Structure formats: C-alpha cells, structure tokens
C-alpha cells in the first residue's frame, strides 16, 4: 500500500450531485472558510448532463468560474451518470474499485483527506440528491475500512466530522454558520450558472425568477435565528462534543442567540 497523498489535500470538502448544488447551499461556508485561510474543495458527482438547459461543457466552465469566486483550491467532477446516481452503480464491473460510484468517491476521500465533509441531507425533492446522500454516507463509512480497496490504493481515511446540508427541504439545524460577510460573494458564484438560472422559456424550477430570492430568503431566515444577516444551516447525525464550552461560546457569541426558535 502506498502512502501517497494528494498535495492539494483540503480542510473542507463539499460534495454535490450536480454543478451548482454546492454553491446554492454551501457557498457561504466555502467562501468564509477560504477567506479564513483554509483549503477548500468541491466534488461534483455528475456533469448535470440531463439538465433541460445548458451543455455539460458549458456547465463545467460555469463551475470553474464559480469555484474561483468562492476561492476553492480543488474542484473535481466524478462523471457519474446524471439521473442514475445510487450507491450500487458500477458494483458489477470487473474492476469495481475504480469503476463503481462507491469506489470513486472513496478514492477521492482518501486522496484529499478533508477534515470536514459536507454532503446533502437525506430528504430532498430531487431523486439524485437523495441518492447522493446515500452514496456519500456509504462512501464515508467504507473510506475508513482497511479491507475496502480503492484505486489508486491509499490508506483508510475518516474525516473529523460530516455535515449534512439541506437544499429544498427545511430541517432542524444542529448549528447555523454566519455567512453574512461573504453573502455577496456567494450570490456572485451562483450567478455564474447563467445557463441554469436564465434558460430559454424558464421551464425548470431552478430557472424560475424566484430561485435566487428563495435561497436568499432561506439564508436570511436561518441568519435571523442567530441574530445575523445571513446564515447557512447544517445538521449532524449525533450530538456535538465540546472540550471547552466556555471558550466556544465566548468565541462564537451568536451560537446561542435564539432570535426565533421552534418548540422541541
């Protein structure tokens, strides 16, 4: 087994089913982390080739531009089949370590070795988003299993934490990230996807003139919960441990500021 690790290893890695998913939902956190000096990355599972507007080549150029705006260090596309995402894709291939969807995601995790991983929430409107959540959850588990062989062969890897982000679904967040300072940069990155946001005839949901307003309203809504202008919600699968709660809340004064709460 080789110990080779990509020199572009990142601190934070966000996965999306299609180009533009991450920008819409996690663009604020990615921009904020990059501005703080962390190495960030985006991995798109598919090229979005089934989209009603735009070509895969055009969307690749838009994705590259959006990544530049957000300051990401790495952006990759796994070229999995749009519309056919599932944890078992390619399982029966002779060389499933490199051909299967699971093997390819595990290889990326072991190569880039992110401390923090962002993946879609389990319940979403788009079937590919739910399938991506299932595929990524499985890959994150097997990335740490020594007996699971990836191509190239790399040591097992487990990130420090995995955060799930909602798309067109409301969830009870484990915490909300203040992205107010770079909200404009997030919008600029989203605007890179002109082929999706302003398609001829506007026949798609993302092509609706209300899309940008809706996502801005969502950020304002979650931001209002902690007393800031814009916030992004993230969910953990279990409780979060704190070694020094006093220091944590002193350094994050908005963390416990519940301007608008829900009954539990």
Image (tube, rainbow, N blue to C red):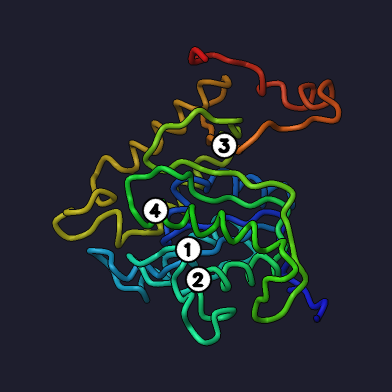
Upstream in the sequence, badge 1 or badge 4?
1
Q: Is residue 25 above or below residue 93?
A: above
Q: Secondary structure at mark 4?
A: helix
The N terminus sits in image quarter: bottom right
**Residue 174's spot in the image, x, y percent?**
60, 30
Residue 101 got which mark? 2
Taking depth in this image into account, of 181 and 139 the one nearest to the observer is 139
Upstream in the sequence, badge 1 or badge 2?
1
How busy is the neighbourhood of tag 4: few (under 14 within 10 Å), some, or many (20 plus)?
many
> What residue is shown with label 3?
235
Left or right position of 2 against 102: right
Q: What residue lies at 48% left-to-right and 15% top-to-bottom?
A: 262
Question: Distance of mark 1 from mark 3, alpha carbons?
Answer: 21 Å
Upstream in the sequence, badge 1 or badge 3?
1
Question: Distance of mark 3 from mark 2, alpha carbons?
Answer: 24 Å
Residue 87 got which mark? 1
> What residue is shown with label 4?
191
Question: Distance of mark 3 from mark 4, alpha carbons?
Answer: 26 Å
Label 1 close to label 2 by CB (< 8 Å): yes
How busy is the neighbourhood of tag 2: few (under 14 within 10 Å), some, or many (20 plus)?
many
Q: Is residue 238 above or below residue 21?
A: above
**Residue 193's spot in the image, x, y percent?**
37, 59
Frontmost of labels 3 and 2 is: 2
Q: Secondary structure at mark 3?
A: loop
Label 3 close to label 2 by CB (< 8 Å): no
Q: Is residue 86 above or below residue 81?
A: above
Left or right position of 102 against 126: right
């Amino acid at each position: 087994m080789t110990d080779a690790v990509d020199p572009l290893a990142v601190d934070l890695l966000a996965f999306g089913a299609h180009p533009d998913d991450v920008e819409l939902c996690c663009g604020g956190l990615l921009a904020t982390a990059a501005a703080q000096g962390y190495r960030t990355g985006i991995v798109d599972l598919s090229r979005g080739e089934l989209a009603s507007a735009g070509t895969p080549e055009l969307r690749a150029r838009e994705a590259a531009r959006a990544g530049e705006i957000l300051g990401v260090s790495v952006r990759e596309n796994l070229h999995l089949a749009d519309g056919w995402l599932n944890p078992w894709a390619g399982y029966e291939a002779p060389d499933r370590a490199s051909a299967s969807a699971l093997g390819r995601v595990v290889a990326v995790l072991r190569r880039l070795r992110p401390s923090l991983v962002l993946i879609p929430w389990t319940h979403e409107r788009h079937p590919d988003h739910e399938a991506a959540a299932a595929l990524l959850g499985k890959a994150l588990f097997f990335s740490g299993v020594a007996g699971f062989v990836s191509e190239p062969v790399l040591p097992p890897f487990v990130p420090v934490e995995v955060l799930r982000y909602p798309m067109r679904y409301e969830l009870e967040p484990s915490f909300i990230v203040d992205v107010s300072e770079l909200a404009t940069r997030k919008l600029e990155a989203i605007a890179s996807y002109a082929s999706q946001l302003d398609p001829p005839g506007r026949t798609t949901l993302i092509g609706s003139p209300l899309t940008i307003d809706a996502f801005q309203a969502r950020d304002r809504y979650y931001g209002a919960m902690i007393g800031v202008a814009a916030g992004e919600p993230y969910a953990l699968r279990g409780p979060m441990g704190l070694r020094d709660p006093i220091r944590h809340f002193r350094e994050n004064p908005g963390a416990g500021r519940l301007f608008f709460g829900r009954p539990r």
